[in-house]
Image: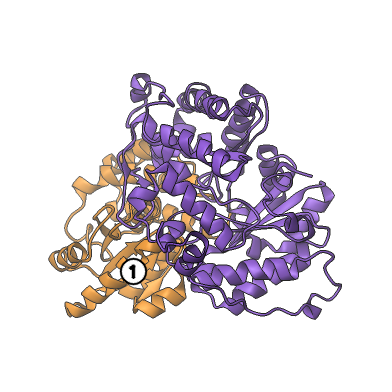
Chain colours: A orange, B purple
Amino acid sequence: MAIQEIFNAVLAFDEATVISKTQAELDGGTDIGTILNDGLISAMDEVGERFSAGELFVPEMLMAAQAMKAGLKILKPHLSAGQSKSKGVVVIGTVKGDLHDIGKNLVSMMMEGAGFEVVDLGVDVDSEKFVKTAAEKSADVIALSALLTTTMPSMESTVKAVKEAGMATRTIIGGAPVTQAFADQIGADGYSADAPGAVKLVKQLVA
Amino acid sequence: MSIEMETDLITSEAVNQVAVGAQSNDHSAHLAGVSTNRFFTDAATFVQVQLLVTEYYKLDVLSNFWDVYNIEAEALGQKVVYHPGGIPDTDRTRPLIGTPSDLDRLSPPNPYRSGRMPWVLQINKNYLEMAGKLERVYFTAPFSLAVNIRGYENLVTDMFERPRFAHRLFRFLCDDVLGPYLETMREEVDIPDLLMDGRDAWASPPMINLDMMDEYIVAYTERLRNNLGGNLITRGNWGDAKSRDPERFFSQKCRCSPGSLSALDPDLCEVGPERVKKYARQHNLSVAAGIDATLLKDGPIEAIVQRIKRYIDKMARDGRCMIHLNQIAAETPPEHVHAAVAACHTFGRLPIPENIDDVQFDIPRSPRFSEFVREKMGTAGV
């Protein structure tokens, strides 16, 4: 019942209730995995579904993600190694020459909300940094974002650098000017038009 | 006729055909072989290049679009990054207003001294002098300016959790920043009723919901318009297809830009020109139809021509439609732009035949920009 309240509070963007209910469940001895999976992660799955259906807009998705992160912050110190095992590691960033970060940040939050470990490299990231970090973190996926047509070639050079490094890490791309056709053209492993779609895509790639 | 349709037509031919305009800035610099650093800081170069590009592409509306979204933010102190070879961009990862209390430390910019505001004032004067007319000037609409100095995520959080602060920020931007700047632009060219054309790409679903559109975008556009004594619009919104209720969004956009409905690809294509035109007809509006920048860049030419032909067929038969080439990417092949303009002029010659397929269209052959400039000016460079 209280898990449902955490779920509802995330959907209501009610950060204070998420914090109090998560803490109460933790103090009451509820299994942490249950709080995490059935409360926080399920709620973000629902947010993603509602966004994809056009029922929610980005501001609501953003506020829900912030509420989820507040709950996650309470759980994190208590997660055991087994419980905290992520669904995969995603290295994410906006490519070289591009300072736009809204889409990247949303994808990052949704990935985290879905149980992935996210390493956010920020904006204006060159291909060497993507490759180096992905190798250090044994990343499953590198997610590349761009808003400018002029920076799309940076996506291509990063995808190329990953392949040349002989890494098994998969690459996905997204951003306003990017298309599936462009992803195919540069040899990326996937493309998504929005944050919930990116989560689904990564889930498929790491399955 | 609307503000959009009344102004800016620079050729007498344009009254007999569907007019075409373009948003071109770094593309213009690229075409002319001028560094973007020079293009976006040297008023004489900017205006000369834009006038040549307007003529080269045979545009019906003067190309005078600078990197509009940066000017006021930069003048306030927000960092703007000048990418070599690209369009300058506001660094929103380090917003000027990091915490609400930062607003109290902000001083309104001085249009004669702050950032590139003096550059814009000079551009306006140069257009008036070199083109003989100045129909409009551009500015960043309040919402997009707020995003640029507060950061999108912070601003959204403000709207949900600190609405009083959010409204204080918008009042500051309208009353203390934009108002004096726009008044100065009008005074400097001595055109008291000069049209102020605000751009607001950030105010687009799904980045905002439609209640936010009412509370922050429509309301503050109207506040600014009242403060400035009229002749002020904001537009450039996309996201019709993501709005869940396109007709409500259309009506909101028309409150921001009375008399004209602007619908931009990819939303126009997704919502459909028929639906847009139906709304425009019901509300006695002209339509500005924006053509997809990615389509323009990637082509093929046949697809560009087909898109324009469809829009003209469905929306321009009453002559109340103009075509707008959305932000042309720097690397867009010039032949794509020439084909788009020729398609507008060929299919859009009024009256449009009942069966538009009866109109013969040939892909135009055009000189290189350097050849055009050499012929016109006796020298290849700008």
The residue positioned 25% from the left and 76% from the top of the image is A160
Please say if B279 is above or below B329. above
Q: Residue at x 70, y 49 (%)?
A: B261
The residue at 45%/24% (across/down) is: B165
Local crowd size for mark 1, using a 10 Å CA cut-off: few (<14), some (14–19), many (≥20): some
* Residue situated in front as seen by the camera: A192 or B61: B61
- Disc 1 designates what residue? A153
The percent position of residue B224, horizontal first and vertical second, equals 60, 27
User: How far from the left and from the top, in percent, is residue B211?
Assistant: 61, 39
Q: Quadrant of residue B229?
A: top right
Residue B207 visible in the picture: yes
| Residue pictured at 55% horizontal, 39% vertical | B129
**Where B227 falls versus B207 (above or below)?**
above
Quadrant showing the C terminus of chain B:
bottom left
Query: Can you say which quadrant of the picture contains the N terminus of chain B?
Result: top right
Q: Which amino acid, by three-letter code, is at mark 1?
A: Pro
SS at badge 1:
helix
